[in-house]
Amino acid sequence: MSSDPKFEIVRPTGILDGTQAQKFRKTVRECLDNNPEIILVNLQDVTFIDSSGLGGLVSALKMVRTAGAKMSICSINDQVRMLFELTSMDRVFKVYPDEETFKQKVVDAS
């Protein structure tokens, strides 16, 4: 019997702004219906995040925590990394270099 944590992966694309943030939160809410232990947000295809997008990430994190799950992020580009560092979001979110590293450290480690 496997004790791997159950996880869902969300992969937003393009610019994470107010409109996209609403879609993102809706997707995360739908993922929570599957009762995952962890939601991994892969930002590989996100080119830019504005303040609304950042707000969307934080509100999704609150939603995930309320559901008793965790949320991690992976594959952020330099612009997003800089934004995370400037806003201290790198301390709020557990950030992994990529999905493979996440799976090795979180899924395979359990």
Image: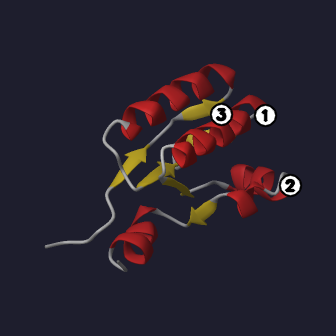
The type of residue carrying mark 3 is Gly
Residue found 48% across the figure and 26% down from its top: 26
Mark 3 and mark 1 lie on one chain; the one further toward the N terminus is 1
Residue under numbered circle 3: 56
**Residue 49 seen in the figure:** no
Q: Nearer the viewer, mark 2 or mark 3?
A: 3
Quarter of the rendering containing residue 17 = top right
Residue under numbered circle 1: 51
Residue found 84% across the figure and 51% down from its top: 87
Residue found 36% across the figure and 50% down from its top: 36
Q: Secondary structure at mark 3?
A: helix
| CA distance for labels 3 and 1 | 9 Å
Q: Residue furthest right?
A: 86
The type of residue carrying mark 2 is Leu
| CA distance for labels 2 and 3 | 17 Å
Residue under numbered circle 2: 86
